[in-house]
Image: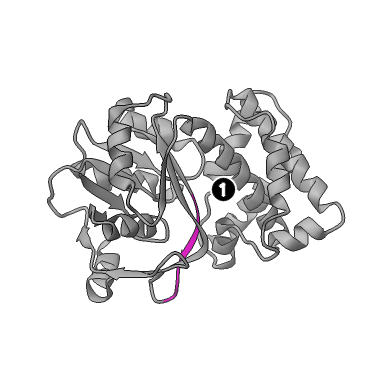
Amino acid sequence: MRILVLGAGGIGGYFGGRLAESGQDVTFLVRPKRKSYLERNGLAIHSENGDFNFNPKLITRDDRAEAFDVVLLSSKSYHLEHAIEDLQPFIHHNTVIIPLLNGIAHIPTLQSEFGKSNIMGGYCVIETTLDTSGEIVHTSTFDKLFFGELNGEDSQRAKHIAEAFSNSKAQFILSNNITQGMWHKYLMITVLSGVTTLMHAPIGPIRDSVGGTQFIESLYNEVATIMRAEGAPLDNQIVPKYMKALTQLSYHFKTSMQRDMEKGLNIEADHLQGHLLKLADQHQIQAPLLTTIYQNHKVYKEMLQ
């Protein structure tokens, strides 16, 4: 099985690296600058689950290569248009694309570009970042990647991919309810990224402040209401489950959006909070907390100009 990973950053580099470590045929589609760095230094992963350093197979959008069997698409949402253009030469009618973007709005776009049958569902649960030297730092023991058919079918191709991914040190998990999992993660990341960026604090001080837990729960309920109106298959107890999980998060836990804002980088506010507010408007749902959070993001992005 020939696997193409778009990007060699914290997500693509980690999971693609783990697959390469297990003996899979993995190629990374990267920008010329990243390619030059990796050719000089190799791809390094630092993790409690085991360090790994190797010389990866690399291509850029201008290189020629045969089409791939499986693609792991790990770009940011604001790079999706360019990612689609970069991938086009390496896709054939049987290529399976597993997107790992946050949110849900990218699925119809990818289905329109590559064909509905070529797109699986996917998401990951991991904390990684690139350090200042360009190496991947995995900052927790969680490294789960979920994938599966969007219609819930227990297909042969999904089983074949699961078998290929099975010997990795990372956890690649085949799900027959991937759509629910994607919506659940969307709910969680919308709320946690929203409160941490609004209040410019890790989750601990927010959670421990007077009224902080109630604010988070109110936001969870507001977002879940929008999602259910859209037909999202949320578990009836998902908000209580996430509120219980909130108590287990590290006091110093920060979301990736919060870290990006602290670095003055672009953020995925339009793809996450912004998309949900469009859905709220379509369903005539008032969302004052989410609106406040998104306004904060808009001000931040305006100041980046």
What element does badge 1 sit on? loop
Give residue 97's position: percent from left, percent from top: 31, 39
- Left of 222 or right of it: where is 302? left
The structure's colour scheme is: one colour
Give residue 117's position: percent from left, percent from top: 31, 26
Q: Which amino acid does label 1 sit on?
A: Ala
On screen, residue 108 above or below 171: above
For the stretch drawn in magenta, the main secondary structure is strand
Give residue 280's position: percent from left, percent from top: 65, 30
Res 289 quadrant in image? top right
- Left of 78 or right of it: where is 193? right
Give the residues drawn in magenta, as a range. Answer: 125-132
Res 46 quadrant in image? bottom left
- Left of 272 or right of it: where is 166? left
Give residue 267's position: percent from left, percent from top: 53, 54
Quadrant of the rendering where the N terminus is positioned: top left
